[in-house]
Amino acid sequence: MSTWAKVAFVVALGLLGLVWFGIGFELVERWNRPLGPALGWPTLAPRTPAPTSNGNQATATPFETPGSNLIGLPYEATLPVFPTRTPPAHPSRARCGGPERMLILAIGSDTRGSGYLYGLADVIRLVRVDFANPGVTVLEFPRDLWVEIPDISDHHGITHEKLNQSYLYGNPGFGYYDGPGLGPGLLARTLDLNFGARPDHYLAINMQTFVRLVDAYGGVEINLPYAVDGRMSDQQTRDDLYFKPGPQRLKGEQALTLARMRIGSNADRSAHQSLIACALRDAALKPSNIGRLPDVIQAFEGAVQTDLSPREISALTCLAPQIPPQNIRFVSFPEDLLTASRIYDPIFKKQVFIYKADFDRMRLYVAAFQSGDWPTPPSAIAPAEPLPTPLTPAAPAASPGEPFSCP
């Protein structure tokens, strides 16, 4: 081989290497790229606390939560004593290539369309995923909380509204918000301003996608501990609004109806949603449903709002089968933190139902939730202390504020 041929061969190999390097770099970049606009949290600095339900601001002192979030808390804000977790002598490493913990803002949009231009946040949950000690804890935020909404006061003077409105105003349909994360971003900032909740990521699913997901699994199996009757006096022939007690399989539309139905308190509605979430988890892990995976992927494809990357979704998928059912826990704020009321809404020009909140104590509960101290981790509960009542086929939902686990 002549000298020039050798040079050409080396150059060709170099170019081929650069091409493969470029392809590899692009694949890695796509693997780590968020599927939607990121939340884009700025570095926090001390700030004045969010106003209470009556619009007044409480005198506060900075309180540092895990993740270096500085949240204004009043001196008098107190909580029940949470058992202190004892760190293991050799802390376990995060599994599946995930972080030690991940906070996800889960949103159920009430739009029946295929997109996310409009729609209220019908379901608002903060989900704490523990990759070191596999577990998932879910905290419900009532959608009717009356809160301050940041960054949109230039539009009709909107400063306060129900919590679920912040998601609607943040999505592109109204054009009120041009900050990071669209609707989920404005909802996340509203939660941070009022309660100190700062999720790492978000996942929003609309009603049409939820129905398709349940149907892709062939329905979900639940065991209702009591009958749920959503019929009015003139709807006694509406069988679709009545759910008998006991085991039953629900199709997509039936599961959606049960998830949205509120018969008594908000806690009942939350319990129904949690039962369905547990049933979806069981369906996803059932070996007989492996063949349904293409239908499940198709139900999700292009039909969700999320800033999770393929790498993070892969880590969550890897972790899911490693989580024992008792480590999937749902919790609500204690009822004494919320007061049902009505208020004049200047945007809708009428009286609306709302929940007034004890913001000071709710911030403390949120801080304890984000750090993993509330609800008490299963490993920190003494054997002599009875576990909170779970939501099982044999028992109704636990009292608000008490955690319950998947059956």
Image (tube, rainbow, N blue to C red):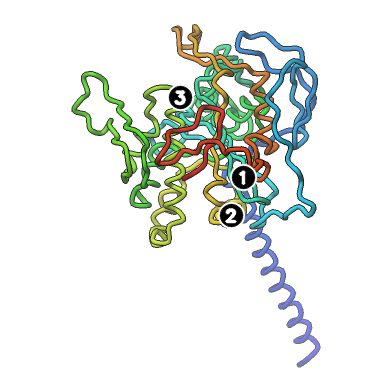
Q: Residue 169's spot in the image, x, y percent?
A: 53, 24
Observer-nearest of 268 and 49: 268
Observer-nearest of 363 and 114: 363
For the residues carrying marks 2 and 3, which lies nearer the camera in this image? 3
The image quadrant where one finds the N terminus is bottom right
Observer-nearest of 213 and 86: 86
Give the farthest residue toward the left: 237
Residue 49, compared with residue 64, is above or below; it is: above
Nearer the N terminus, badge 3 or badge 1? 1
Residue that numbered label 3 is attached to: 266
Q: Residue 54's spot in the image, x, y percent?
A: 61, 8
Q: Identify which residue is drawn at 37% across, 28% down.
A: 261
Residue that numbered label 2 is attached to: 319
Label 1, label 2: how far apart the Cα atoms are = 9 Å
**Residue 137: assigned label:** none
Residue 160, compared with residue 131, is above or below; it is: above
**Residue 129: assigned label:** 1
Residue 192 visible from this viewpoint: yes
Say whether residue 238 is left or right of residue 9.
left
Q: Residue 383's spot in the image, x, y percent?
A: 64, 43
